[in-house]
Image: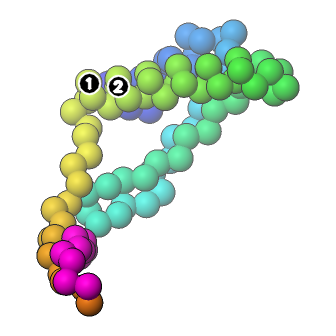
Amino acid sequence: MTLKRRMTEFVTGERLQFLPKMELHPFEIDSVNKIKIQIYIEHRNNWQDGDRRSANRSKFILTLREHLLDLGITYKRLPEVVQLVENSASEQVLKSVKT
């Protein structure tokens, strides 16, 4: 089952919190190891109730993370080169160099 289908089922199952409409769009591939996606969901609750909206958003994000792990979708940072550089006061400073 795809990520989009799983998250659509979640939103549909949570009818008290969300409208059963969800859009998921990949929009950017960064450094060949990261895909950025946009997810549009509509909350059913009153927007003035920030605590409830925040709790529903957290529940959505945790479910998204769970499904990503189930599907084996993970992110690993690219390695970075670290060099020790001496400054004018003869102190060593860590300098990160992106490759």
Q: Quadrant of residue 48?
A: top right
Query: Would residue 47 be visible to someone looking at this image?
Result: yes
Q: Which residue is mark 1?
A: 70
Q: Give percent across and percent down for residue 98.
A: 25, 74
Placement of 69 over or under 11, stated as above or below: below
Q: Does 77 sit left or right of 60 as displayed?
A: left
Query: Would residue 99 be visible to someone looking at this image?
Result: no
Q: Give percent across and percent down for residue 65.
A: 38, 29
Q: Number of labelled discs?
A: 2
Rate crowding at label 2 as few (under 14), some (14 to 19) or many (20 or more) other CA atoms within 10 Å: some
Q: Give percent across and percent down for residue 82.
A: 16, 70
Q: Nearer the viewer, residue 70 or 4?
A: 70
Residue at image x 16%, y 62%? 79
Q: Nearer the viewer, residue 55 or 94?
A: 94
Q: Amino acid at mark 2?
A: His
Residue at image x 36%, y 53%? 35
Q: Amino acid at mark 1?
A: Asp
Q: Does residue 95 belong to the magenta stretch?
A: yes
Q: Secondary structure at mark 2?
A: helix
Q: Does 44 sit left or right of 94 as displayed?
A: right
Q: Give percent across and percent down for residue 33.
A: 25, 57
Q: Quadrant of the C terminus?
A: bottom left
Q: Which residues are magenta?
A: 89-99
Rate crowding at label 1 as few (under 14), some (14 to 19) or many (20 or more) other CA atoms within 10 Å: few
Q: Quadrant of residue 73?
A: top left
Q: Nearer the viewer, residue 22 or 73?
A: 73
The disc at residue 67 is: 2
Residue at image x 71%, y 21%? 51
Q: Does residue 41 belong to the magenta stretch?
A: no
* Contact, mark 1 vs mark 2 (Cβ under 8 Å): yes
